[in-house]
Amino acid sequence: MTNLIRARENGPLLIDGSATYTDANGKEQTTTGSAVALCRCGGSASKPFCDGAHRKIEFQAPAIELELKSAE
């Protein structure tokens, strides 16, 4: 199985589909929607999720793609 994480130019990390994570209180949560946007600029008030702060702080970074392959 392969998962792809994309980083938009000057923007967040994008993961297609929903994701399950453990919050700061140790509770497992699952996102809803077609994609998850994670903060890459450090300025989001809702970390680890993106809230658009990268636009306000004029964050600059290249677009990248990370391919995660499971060890099978």
Image (cartoon, helix red, strand yellow):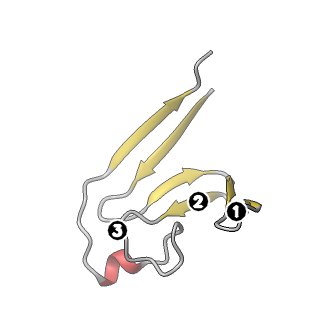
**How far is the residue under mark 2 from the one under mark 1?**
7 Å
- Judged left or right of residue 27, residue 5 is left
User: Residue farthest to the top?
Assistant: 72
User: Residue farthest to the bottom?
Assistant: 56
Q: Earlier in the sequence, mark 1 or mark 3?
A: 1
* Residue 65: quarter of image: top left
Helix, strand or loop under label 1: loop
Which residue lies at the image location 59% right of the left edge and 25% below the top edge? 70
Helix, strand or loop under label 3: loop
- Judged left or right of residue 46, residue 34 is right
Query: Looking at the image, how many numbered discs can be counted on the residues?
Result: 3
The vertical placement of 32 against 66, above or below, is below
- Judged left or right of residue 63, residue 49 is right
For this rendering, which residue is in front, 41 or 32?
A: 41
* Residue 8: quarter of image: bottom left
Amino acid type, label 3: Cys
Which residue in the structure is indicated by mark 3?
41
Amino acid type, label 1: Gly
Helix, strand or loop under label 2: strand
Which residue lies at the image location 52% right of the left edge and 62% below the top edge? 37
The spot of residue 18 in percent (x, y) is 69, 54
| Residue contact at pointers 2 and 3, CB within 8 angstroms | no
Which residue lies at the image location 34% right of the left edge and 68% below the top edge? 41
Which numbered dot is residue 33? 1
How dense is the environment of label 2, judged by Cα within 10 Å: few (below 14), some, or many (20 and up)?
Answer: some
Which residue in the structure is indicated by mark 2?
36
**How far is the residue under mark 1 from the one under mark 3?**
22 Å
